[in-house]
Amino acid sequence: MVVQENKSYHTEESKWAAIAARDKGADEQFYYGVLTTGVYCRPGCPSRLPNRPNVVFFNTPKEAEEAGYRACRRCWPGTVSTADRMEDIMIAACRAIEQAGKPIKLADLAARAGLSPYHFHRLFKKIVGLTPRRYGSTHQAKRFRGLLRSGRSVTDAQYRAGYSSSSRLYEKTDDDLAMQPKTYKNGGKGMMIEYGFGHCFLGRVMVAATERGICAVEIGDDPPALLARLREYFPKADLERAGSGLAALIQAVISGIDSPAEGSGLPLDIRGTVFQQRVWQALGQIKPGCTASYADIAEAIGNPKAVRAVANACASNRIAVLIPCHRVIGKDGRLAGYRWGAERKQKLLAHEQKS
Ligand SMILES: [Zn+2]
């Protein structure tokens, strides 16, 4: 065994001092195992400091493993690179979330990965790009939308997607499909919204998104007016002009408008009451080229008397085209109103009929 030349850590006292100080400079110089846990670490490991009598020293990871110790999952002293190990762990966590069919507690996910909840959360977000909770709710919402598209009723889809009842849908996804009532009333206080512009066949498009998904799509003639609308929707949110980071999303929205397809699959950050959400979800069921009446939608959400409320919910839609409120027309075939202009509504419907 070749012991690395190092003058600082040649006594057990100096090694222990390095561990107690979590001295990263001592990493790779030696390793230590903890008798009570059977785990071995780098000296700079941020884990809880073991009791001195339980500590044994090794020169290499191999030596520690031969002595029956397993690599710590925080400092990864083993031979495989930390990044690779972490990626594997996070991929396994993603699969576990998908297969569970219902939300898994952060503490449980972290325990499975052998990490502290804080550490797990941070790494998950770094590697996957979403928080575990967000990943779970996105997956669930995707499943929910898939079930809805397959023709199930809203309540049946909720149940099958793992939401235990319609009230739970609101509760569980309050940070996902809907804004919490308080935040909603607060005008989006605490929200970070990025926005950008593009062109579609109806004119200028503004796409606004939070880290959760698209929260507004506006169509109009000039960007300042579109931005003014966004400010009106979310007066207290932080609005920021997006760099190139939003370009792909904007392009996807434009493609969705220009070539209508059933369900864009784009992530939406829907902010509204439970009732509004139900209406908006039902709107998504109207295929391009088809229309429905407000009464049809009221019927579809199991609330046939709520025609007026349905009309209001349609009028409150802020995500143009992706939530296809333009496919709802008056019972008598009149176009009825459209936030983005009756002329655009007519154009859109004609365009979808051709496509
Ligand atoms: Zn460690």
Image: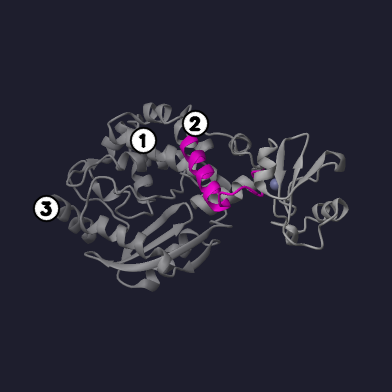
Query: On the rendered structure, is 319 left or right of 65?
Result: left
- Disc 3 from disc 1: Cα separation: 32 Å
Q: Which one is nearer the viewer's eye here, 191 or 234?
A: 191
Tell me where residue 93 appears, x and y as whole percent. 52, 39
Q: Secondary structure at mark 1?
A: loop
Q: Which of pointers 3 and 2 lies earlier in the amino acid sequence? A: 2
- Crowding at label 1, few (<14), some or many (≥20) Cα neighbours within 10 Å? some
Can you identify the residue that label 2 sits on?
102
Region in magenta: 72-96
Q: Residue at x 46, y 49 (%)?
A: 271
Tell which residue pokes out farthest to the left in this image.
354
Q: Amino acid at mark 1?
A: Ala
Q: Secondary structure at mark 2?
A: loop
Q: Choose mark 3 or mark 1, whichever is in front.
A: 3
Type of secondary structure dominating the magenta stretch: helix
Q: Is residue 353 left or right of residue 138?
A: left
Residue 81 within the magenta-colored segment of the rendering: yes
Q: CA distance from mark 2 to mark 1?
A: 31 Å
Judging depth in this view, the residue of 242 and 47 nearest the camera is 47
The residue beneath circle 3 is 354
Residue at the image point whose x is 36% and y is 31% from the top:
154
Disc 3 marks a residue whose amino acid type is Lys
**Residue 208 tag number:** none
Mark pair 3, 2: CA separation: 41 Å
From the top left corner, tell me how far across and down residue 344 is, in percent.
Answer: 23, 60
Determine whether the beta carbon of the residue marked 1 sits less than 8 angstroms from the nearest atom of ligand 1.
no
Q: Is residue 185 visible?
A: no
The x, y position of residue 128, in whole percent, is 49, 50
Quick one: label 3 or label 1, which is nearer the N terminus?
1
Q: Is residue 252 visible?
A: yes
Q: What residue did someone put label 1 on?
A: 306
Check disc 3 and report its element: helix, strand or loop: helix
